[in-house]
Image (tube, helix red, strand yellow):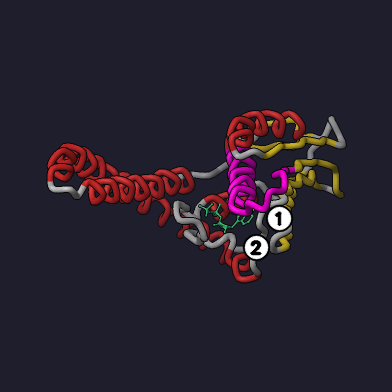
Amino acid sequence: IEQAAFQNDKLAMLGKIAAAIAHEIRNPLTSIRGFIQLLNPFLKNIGKEEYGRIILSEIDRANDIIYEFLNSSKPSAPMKQKVLVGLLLKETTMLSESEALMNGCEIHNEIFDPYLTIAVDVKQIKQVFLNIIKNAMDAIHEKQDGRKGRIDITARLEGKYALISIKDNGKGMQRATLSRLFDPFFTTKEEGTGLGLSVSYRIIRNHGGTIHVDSQLNEGTEFLIYLPYVE
Ligand code: ADP
């Protein structure tokens, strides 16, 4: 246990340093972005506007990574409050609904126990659900086999835990992907940061919970999130 505590201290320290550096990198990035935009007319004149577009989108990508990283390395002692799982899931689903509609996929929400309660940092846990739902939509979007995209969200009591399942009928995963899923910066997407799931994993672990994943290539993926249940 002592070893673990020491590791945690070290991690917290590293997180602080990294967050400070990330913060400092954002300022020069912002000015580079501004000047590239000023150069745009020039690039257009010499027929190289494509270069400007690439530079801008790469700067934006770097900024996204820093933004997510800063979010994930903030002091992460959860501010816990008691909430109904059903309510939390409903609110999160609502936030994803318009994007789901654009992706042509349906989100189904079924809560088997309306009084199922957990004590969590609402903001952090919502972020976890949103990350997983977003990934599900991406997996559905990338599949494109004409089958209607569908995400099923359920919650029930399982022993001492509230078990939340988020299941999609998207493209599924190869075994190699499955084994690296939670590694920071691991991504198979052109525009991905590979931070969503590593951050989610850490948040759930900080809450005394776990995440399991089941996936079948070309069939779909199910994320199972266990969070301690409270009376
Ligand atoms: P990102 O979404 O930026 O790539 P994540 O950490 O959220 O980063 O996800 C890492 C990788 O895990 C994704 O690039 C994708 O390959 C895989 N993945 C995550 N969720 C799913 C899913 N529901 N279906 C298929 N692949 C998934």
At label 1, which amino acid type do we have?
A: Thr
User: As rendered, which of 219 and 188 lies closer to the eye?
Assistant: 219
User: Residue 145 — which label?
Assistant: none
Q: Is residue 91 above or below residue 167?
A: above
- Which residue was labeled with disc 2? 173
- Decide if ligand 1 comes within 8 Å of the CB at mark 2: yes
Judge the density around disc 1: few (<14), some (14-19), many (≥20) Cα neighbours within 10 Å.
many
Identify the mark nearer the N-term, 2 or 1: 2
Start-end of magenta stretch: 124-151
Q: Secondary structure at mark 2?
A: loop
Residue at 50% from the left image edge and 56% from the top image edge: 189
Question: Taking the image as drawn, is residue 141 in sight?
Answer: yes
- Decide if ligand 1 comes within 8 Å of the CB at mark 1: yes
- Which residue was labeled with disc 1? 221
Q: Secondary structure at mark 1?
A: strand
* Tag 2 and tag 1, C-beta contact below 8 Å: yes
Horizontal and vertical percent position of residue 49? 22, 46
